Amino acid sequence: MLFLIPLVSDYPDQFDDVLEFIQDTIKRLKRSSNKQSPSRRERGRQSLASSSQISNKRTIKDRKRKNKGCVLREIHLNVTDLGLGYETKEELKFRYCSGSCNNPETTYDQILKNLTIKKRLVNDKVKQACCRPTAFDDDLSFLDDNLVYHTLKKHSAKKCGCV
């Protein structure tokens, strides 16, 4: 029996998509840990157990410190939970920025704050810095339930800062 292997030139568009998918998948596998990640149910149980232990130990000072500054947080989600219209069982770590930017980051920010307090910038609306991503994770590639290949760009924060 003779099998013919299609050449790259027969399917140039699909070859590039498949090659990109393979490269993105290899990157994701390298980033992921060697351990098997726990199921959603197990993660929920772990978080409930740890949060009840932590809440018993937390002091007023710890509660105040928790929300200070702009920090990177992460949550485990299904791609479908992102609300972008994709139906898939693929999971990801979604990283986001959270916290306040009340403390001036630079001399410029300090000057703006002082001028606003002294009402020297009455007519100008100077906005306070916001906690936002300053860098994003690598692109995320996945197959949906219909076996259609998708890539999400700038989907998850890598670093956060007051912007």
Image (tube, grey):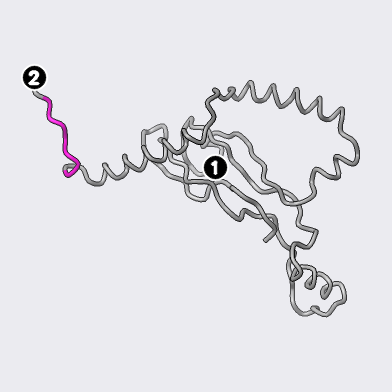
User: Mark 1 or mark 2: which comes first in sequence?
Assistant: 2
Query: What's under tag 1, amino acid-wise?
Result: Gly
How far apart are labels 1 and 2 at the CA level?
48 Å
Occupied quadrant, residue 78: top right
Residue 96 at x, y percent in the picture: 63, 46
Vertically, is 152 above or below 59?
below
Task: Point out the residue furthest to the left here.
Answer: 1
Residue under numbered circle 2: 1
Q: Residue 57's spot in the image, x, y percent?
A: 87, 29
| Residue for point 90% across, 41% down | 61
Label 1 secondary element: loop
Image height of 128 relative to 158, above or below: below
> Crowdedness of circle 2 by 10 Å Cα count: few (<14), some, many (20+)?
few
Is 7 part of what is drawn in magenta?
yes
Residue at 61% in and 56% down: 134
- What residue range appears in magenta? 3-9
Name the one closer to the observer, 63 or 35. 35
Q: Which residue is mark 1?
A: 83
Using residue 162 as the reference point, say whether residue 58 is left or right of it. right
Residue 151 position, x and y percent, is: 43, 44
Based on the displayed image, in which of its 4 quarters is residue 120 positioned? bottom right
Q: The C terminus is located in which quarter? A: bottom right
Toward the viewer: 153 or 87?
A: 153
Indicate whether residue 39 is drawn in magenta.
no
Q: Residue furthest right?
A: 60
Which secondary structure is most common in the magenta stretch? Answer: loop
Q: Nearer the viewer, mark 1 or mark 2?
A: 2
At 45% from the left edge and 39% from the top edge, which residue is drawn?
Answer: 27
